[in-house]
Amino acid sequence: MFEPKKLHPITIVFNILKQLKDIIFPFLAVIFLGGSASKWDSYYNIGIICFSLVTIIGGVLSWYFFTFHLNARELRINHGIFVKKKRYIPFERIQSIDFTEGILHRPFGLVKVKIETAGGVSEAEAVLTAISKVHAEQLREYINRDKNRLHSTEVTDDKGQVEGKQELYKINTKELLVLATTSGGVGVVLSAIIAAVSQFDDFIPYKKIFKEFQHFVANSIAVMTIIAFIIIFVLWIVSLLMTMLKYANFTVSKTGNDLIITRGLLEKKQITIPLNRVQAVRITENMMRQPFGLATVYLESAGGSLQDNEASSVMVSPIIKKGKIKKILEKVLPDYSLEEALHSPPKLAVWRYIFRNSWIALPAIAASVYFFHEWGWISILLLAILSFWGYVKYRAAGWHLSQKQLTISFRHLQKTTLIMRKNRIQTLDYKEGFLQKKAALASLHAIVASGIDGSGGTVSDLMTEDVKKIYSWYSYSKKEV
């Protein structure tokens, strides 16, 4: 472990794929849709051959010159083909060591190791693309043991031994099926298909296809309705399968002061969350799950990067009955408490929620009536729908204050409950607009340090005296927390 080691040779394949990622679609288009023969064909072929050789050689050399090893209390990485680079990462800066076991890793018993450090914002501090799973476990165990010895933070049992791995939660088949069924991932699948097809803009005759499509629609509305239904159903099935593969074997375990999340069937992923980095607990309820009392629980962590937001907002329970969340928190974060009863905004605020959410419909209704006359009045349904949604957002809003914890609740598309410890709140402020001030109302905004821009939320139109009470609680005697 203390001698310089290379990554597994399969890394060459990953290096080549990484170089091809941004140009793979145009590259394939040139090969397969190159058009009729011309005098330039030989130059195209030579260019493709040269590009392929450079890519392969670059992948091999990147692997050959990449080494890593442990030295004293540092992880040292050397890499670079023409410009030699060295990166030294002290153990005390390492916040988490995560494993990913992809399709190409599993046949060889390999994992991808991603190392996150405090202050990393653009990307992971270090990535070991492919090393043996045994070696990766030894690496993590050694680093964690050294950090624990330095900070004296080991969790021990009655016999003085370091606490072993304790399984806290594992998703069952029924929960996985409900999760996949209510995930609403059709839009994600459709977006991926559109993004892939858009790479061939110059080669697909969209105008001709659109004209044929118009003619077909004009002559066969019933058939088009059936086709649309089939497409949506197929996308839903694909979304269901993708979700099940992603969250299969979802398990939450605790080892010492770390929480370990393991999930995935084809690609197995393991995420480590140091509990001392947790900034808040976020509970979300989407429109499909809320009527059944189901929710999703996240931990907002002081980590993450532009390329990997998952490290900052980590799901610890993909789907769970809301009544069981309190037990999960008692096991994972006993300092955090889920409050059952929140204080709602005053009744006089309900009309502000309704108007704020529905006023945009008024010009749309006016335009519809002007252009479509009697038929335009149907658009008044939009006003009713948006007004009802404003009332739903009012019903979702609330707050609760205890000695060392603030809980706020609000809704955008889904209802969110945010539980924050006083000493973890990074910013807390309130806003009084002109009309709010006349009605003795104010809005509360809270942020914790998580991800690039922080994580938080706003509860609108609370009583001014309540918002000032919360603000005073936050600003007074913080040093005692």
Image (tube, helix red, strand yellow):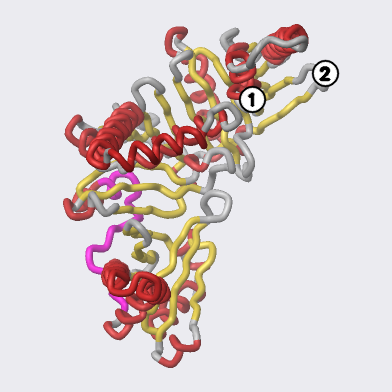
Residue 314 seen: yes
Is 343 part of what is drawn in magenta? yes
Residue at (39, 30) in percent of width and height? 162
Image-quadrant location for residue 408? bottom left
Is 313 part of what is drawn in magenta? no
Few, some or many C-alpha atoms within 10 Å of disc 2 (few <14, some 14-19, many ≥20)? few
Residue 317 seen: no
Quarter containing the N terminus: top right
From the image, tell me which residue sits under label 2: 82
Q: Position of residue 334 (x, y in %)?
A: 32, 51
Residue at (44, 32) in percent of width and height? 193
Image side of residue 78 versus residue 169, left or right: right
Few, some or many C-alpha atoms within 10 Å of disc 1 (few <14, some 14-19, many ≥20)? few
Q: Earlier in the sequence, mark 2 or mark 1?
A: 1
Q: Position of residue 170 (x, y in %)?
A: 26, 33
- Front-most of residues 140 and 242: 242
Compared with 321, 103 (above or below) is above
- Magenta region, residue range: 328-345
Q: Which mark is residue 418?
A: none
From the image, tell me which residue sits under label 1: 23
Image side of residue 397 versus residue 49, left or right: left
Please identify the residue farthest to the bottom as the structure is shown. 438
Residue at (61, 32) in percent of width and height? 91
The residue under label 2 is which amino acid type? Phe
The residue under label 1 is which amino acid type? Ile
> Label 2 to label 1, Cα distance in Å?
23 Å
Residue at (47, 40) in percent of width and height? 310
